[in-house]
Amino acid sequence: MAEVIIMPTRAEAGALVADEIARGIRANPEFVLGLATGSTPLPVYEALRASLDGVDVSQVRGFALDEYVGLDPAHPESYRSVITREVVEPLGLDPARVRVPDGSLARIAHAGELYDAAILDAGGVDLQILGIGTDGHIGFNEPGSSFASRTRVKTLTAQTRDDNARFFASPAEVPMHCITQGLGTILEARHLVLLAFGAGKAAALAAAVEGPVTASVPGSAIQLHPHVTVIVDEEAASEL
Ligand code: GLP
């Protein structure tokens, strides 16, 4: 089973992951960091400001898990904007070395293939940060996603659009489609770090970590990976 670490606060959980990432970057300046969006990884990004102080990050590469399709990249809630605002700018990463899947309609036909090729070209992801959706999704791999899937376009479920409506002016503004790293893509990262905070994630977390390995719970794919760390607070751990 995955190593499960229960931390008293989100800030302490974030600091733990940030220290692990900083260690990785010190050992390998070309470290490849797998980035996640949503509210869950924010304490990690916050803590990284201190953990990376004085560390050379000029060669670090980053790959985000997913992006909305058809949303203007300049929209404040596009994952390109979120990653720029929360990660690239505050940590001083080289924007040219941090990629987010290309959700523009004009290039969507080949965007998945190109993204997987870029990850491969960078030597693969060293540490992938993951959150989990209340329906068990990781990245935007909704229930039913194949464990062998690669980066591709998916339709968001009603529940995910509902969950993410808080980031938009109205629920109708939440895009219908996304482009997400596949479960197969995510499983190729060398270390998976799954974070979950709050009682609302308890059921999805328990299903992913301890339930049957099934496409109905995409997060359960982590059980197939040899190096997984699950970092949670008491509330998210309450159904383990
Ligand atoms: C979002 C993202 C996921 C994220 C999840 C949980 O829709 N695509 O990568 O892990 O849903 O979001 P949050 O961390 O805000 O609860």
Image: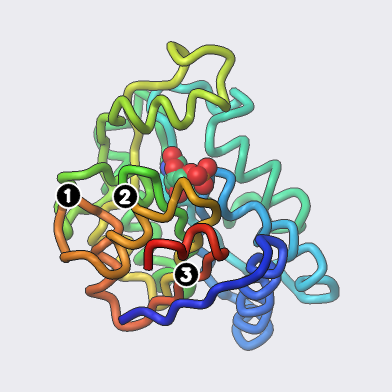
For the point 63% across and 27% down, which residue is it? 76
Label 3 and label 2: CA atoms lie apart by 15 Å
Q: Quadrant of residue 110?
A: top left
Mark 3 — residue?
A: 193
Horizontal and vertical percent for residue 52? 77, 71
Q: Are marks 2 and 1 in contact (CB under 8 Å)?
A: yes
Q: Is residue 59 visible?
A: no
Please name the amino acid that badge 3 sits on: Val
> Which quarter of the rendered picture does the N terminus lie within?
bottom left
Horizontal side, residue 127 vs residue 51: left or right: left
Residue at the spot of label 1:
216
In what element is the residue under mark 2? loop
Label 2 sits on residue = 136
The C terminus - image quarter: bottom left
User: Label 1 sits on what residue type?
Assistant: Ser
Label at residue 168: none
**For the residue carrying disc 3, how many other residues have a C-alpha within 10 Å: few (<14), some (14-19), or many (20+)?**
many
Amino acid type at circle 2 is: Gly
> Marks 1 and 3, how far apart in space?
21 Å
Across and down, in percent, residue 86 comes to: 69, 47
In percent of width and height, residue 24 lies at 60, 81
Pointer 3 residue Cβ closer than 8 Å to ligand 1? no
Q: Nearer the viewer, residue 166 or 48?
A: 166
Q: Is residue 154 found left or right of 107 in the rendered image? A: left
Cα separation, mark 2 vs mark 1, equals 8 Å
Residue 78 spot, x, y in % from top left: 54, 31
Q: Earlier in the sequence, mark 3 or mark 2?
A: 2
Q: Mark 3 touching mark 2, by CB under 8 A?
A: no
